[in-house]
Image (spheres, rainbow, N blue to C red):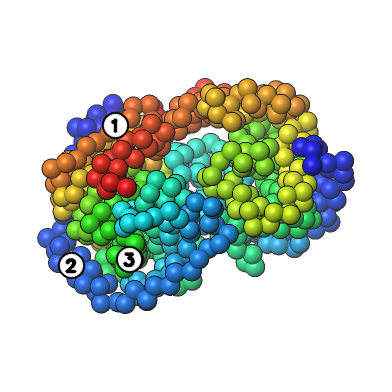
Amino acid sequence: MPRTPPHHYASKVRKPAGFDSFWDGVLEQAAAIPLSAKTAPARLRSPADIETFEVHFNSLDGVRIAGWYCLPRERSKKLPAILTVPGYLGEPPIPLDWARKGYAVISVAPRGKLRSNDQFNPGYPGLLTHNITDRNTYGYKGFYVDAMRGLDYLLTRDEVDVKRIGVVGSSQGGGLAIVAAAMRPEIAAASAGAPYLCGFMDAIGLTSTYPYQEINDYLRLHPDSRKEVEETLAYFDGMSFAERITCPIVVNIGLQDNICPPETGYEVFNKIASEEKRLYTYDGHAHDAGSHEHSQIIDAFFSRHLNP
Amino acid sequence: MADNKPEDFEQYWGDTLGELAALPARPEIEAVPMRDTDSATAYGVYFTGLGSYRLFAYLSIPKGEGPFPALYYTAGYGSVVTPIPQGASNDIRSRHITFSIAARGSRNADKPYAASFPGLLTDGIENPANYRLRGIAADCVRGLEVLLARPEVDASRVVLIGADMALLTAGLASGASHVVAGPALLYKTLEMAEATNAYPLQEINDYLRLHKKAKTAVTRTLSYFDVRWHAPSIEATSLLKAGPVQSATDKIALASLTTAISGPVTVHESENSGYKDGLFADKWVSSQLGFDAPILPEHWR
């Protein structure tokens, strides 16, 4: 049977009634934890035009989180800033490229990534289903907070203009960008590529690829847990967060994306409440979501909104 | 120092493989029921590599009568190793054995050595005997031995998949019928690093910025790993994944590598599209293994 065209797909995800109170409570809990940030120069990773620092700060459950922080060496006034959030498998890159464009930039390693995995290390595959039957202990609860603590770090920096902060990511980073833009009013502009973590329960019926396949693996061994899994994931689904986004945002998706189905990309975009939002669809592209061409669009978007 | 194959290249790798051969692999296998499917059974395999280091691999074997063709995912550049690559249809496990190695430093093989990223590419780089990639290359060779020892494997259809390590493995060991790989970090490494500021190659630039006097030693070490010098030993039928047109690794730029490979070579130039490049590779593998059509992810059908 032919597939429904992706832009006609209707997500099965419903925002839980307790969603807002749950997340307001989580963020309140996180806000009470002192950041206790340490910022150490990373001389080896600092080329002539960029200063790179290795940073660590506290997050939920007392987990110590790592990140890379880069600044252009030549700076005479406050800088706009970028929070970059990582994909599922790769390690957060050192964001020299953003610093070179005139931004203060932090690249966060949420819990479970290397350098942030001493206290929490569910592995890969594993993270996606870690404590998946309880929203209060689900692995992504802390993971989402860790990403947003990167923003808290930026807010402490004297060189950062706190009115000009953006968030950018692709794949899992795209999902995290949606979460951060939804939950934190300090985000002035957002770019989400090939967003993962959007339409979890849709995606497991639309693809047979990892990482979403982890959920199918889990449900095959634990078929009686399906209801709890669905309930938990709705609290972490970008579909549930999207209506809280009001900042300018660009989203790009690949119409042959075999990892984050384009159906879910269309649906999460449709739910975003921002007045200024634009979806870029790339036919002939998979999970790269047209990044080769789209990177210039992202640069221009942040340049317009954050004015580096 | 000239950009040449070292005079003692064969000696270096002969010694390395001799050292490996002296160590029994001693594979131990355990079921991983979480990753089973209706048509395939999943396992974790532990085995010994150079320096008595215990390594790991995910192994998946189709249910039913074998032997089956095998897809061997060699070590890439990152800490995470998954049972099959992200984005591949899980259904490929219904007709192929898949073997995905965690070489030393990667998760599941990160004790006692946990590699850092960035960092791995320059770990021990001033001495060829201590360079981390020596152990990782040997790990990939050992992985092939472990895979080929499985009675379910159709030894006439074994595909090495990956990047530099797939090419090195094909050059250092016999037994693979096919290779699907694109050089990423071990092709003219210094020259490529000088032309970029993107990681992982930026690691080389970082290192040489702080260790200016090390360039000769770094050049020498890297020369043992350059895929051009391994190419003449590659007899498998190869799909070489080149960069896009006019990039530093496009078809023209890779000519010296392509022509040096002993076996038949098909070169595919990237179209800057994971879909188009992936589809080409999947069709090529399927055709080479004698199937009518590849098993594609849903959105590629």
Q: Quadrant of residue A270?
A: top left
Establish whether labels 3 and 1 are both on one chain: yes
Q: Chain of mark 2?
A: A
Q: Determine the secondary structure under disc 2.
A: helix
Q: Amino acid at mark 2?
A: Asp
Discs 3/1, front:
3
Is the residue marked by circle 3 packed among few (<14), some (14-19), or many (20+) residues within 10 Å? few
Q: Earlier in the sequence, mark 3 or mark 2?
A: 2
The residue under the point 46% across, 39% down is B88
Q: Amino acid at mark 3?
A: Asp
Q: Which residue is mark 3?
A: A158
Q: Which residue is mark 1?
A: A281
Is the residue marked by circle 2 packed among few (<14), some (14-19), or many (20+) residues within 10 Å? few
- Give percent across and percent down for residue A20: 15, 62
Q: Across the whole image, how many numbered discs are drawn on residues?
A: 3
Q: Amino acid at mark 1?
A: Thr
- Give percent across and percent down for residue B163: 61, 39
Q: Earlier in the sequence, mark 3 or mark 1?
A: 3
Front-most of B104 and A72?
Answer: A72
Check the picture and name the quadrant holding the C terminus of chain B.
Answer: top left
Asked if residue B255 lies left or right of residue A139, the reply is right
Query: How far is disc 1 from disc 2 in space, using C-alphas?
Result: 33 Å
Any mark on residue A27, and which? Answer: none
Asked if residue A281 lies left or right of residue A17, the reply is right
Q: Earlier in the sequence, mark 1 or mark 2?
A: 2
Query: How far is disc 3 from disc 2 in space, using C-alphas?
Result: 27 Å
Task: Judge whether residue A57 can be spotted in this image.
Answer: yes
Front-most of A239 and A221?
Answer: A239
Any mark on residue A24, and which? Answer: 2
Q: Determine the secondary structure under disc 1.
A: strand
